Image (cartoon, rainbow, N blue to C red):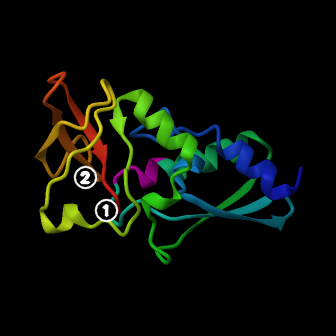
């Protein structure tokens, strides 16, 4: 296993602070790692959006996890370009979101309907019905919208295409 593969494996043990069923690696936040020598490492991360309140927790978790694994000097490099996109979510992460009760993004980032205010039917993660309606542009976090299924009557978060 290469150095990078090993570090990504270690970091894949860190859950997203807001969605603990997926890791920060599956989320696509961890972009790169660099061996700086002498047990020093640099981890490049990209926030899901510029105001994401979970980023500080992610940074702290990365530092703690790597120090736990013998790295004495951990540097975090925050990059904003290219901007994070839901296209970076792994297929495994999307399945985990659905099983957790959050509807994963159904389109790629080319779908900007949430910006224009157009509503669309999203598949309910519980009963799999597409007979749903958006209740609010914002769900439990700013990156999610709140939907209601008209068949099972449950509300659910939809991870917006960003």
Q: Secondary structure at mark 1?
A: loop
- Picture coordinates of residue 69, whole percent (x, y): 77, 41
Q: Secondary structure at mark 2?
A: loop
Mark 1 surroundings: few (<14), some (14-19) or many (≥20) residues within 10 A? few
Of labels 1 and 2, the one closer to you:
2
Question: Looking at the image, is 53 positioned above or below residue 103?
Answer: below
* Residue shown at the point (43%, 58%) measured from the top left: 86
Residue 133: name its quadrant.
top left
Q: Label 2, on which residue?
A: 142
- Picture coordinates of residue 159, whole percent (x, y): 33, 48
Q: Is residue 133 left or right of residue 96?
A: left
Q: How many marks?
A: 2
- Picture coordinates of residue 105, whole percent (x, y): 37, 50
- Segment colored magenta: 53-57
* Residue 28 shows in this picture: yes
* Residue shown at the point (18%, 39%) measured from the top left: 147
Residue 107: name its quadrant.
bottom left
Quadrant showing the C terminus: bottom left
């Amino acid at each position: 296993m290469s150095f990078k593969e090993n570090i990504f494996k270690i970091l894949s043990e860190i859950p997203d602070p807001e969605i603990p069923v997926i890791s920060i690696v599956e989320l696509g936040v961890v972009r790169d790692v660099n061996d700086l020598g002498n047990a020093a490492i640099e981890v490049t991360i990209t926030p899901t959006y510029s105001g994401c309140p979970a980023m500080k927790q992610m940074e702290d978790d990365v530092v703690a996890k790597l120090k736990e694994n013998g790295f004495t000097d951990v540097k975090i490099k925050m990059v904003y370009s290219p901007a994070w996109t839901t296209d970076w979510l792994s297929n495994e992460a999307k399945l985990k979101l659905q099983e957790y009760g959050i509807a994963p993004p159904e389109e790629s980032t080319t779908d900007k309907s949430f910006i224009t205010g157009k509503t669309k039917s999203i598949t309910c993660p519980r009963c799999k019905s597409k007979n749903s309606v958006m209740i609010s542009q914002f769900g439990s976090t700013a990156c999610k919208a709140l939907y209601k299924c008209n068949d099972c009557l449950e509300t659910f978060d939809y991870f917006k295409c960003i």
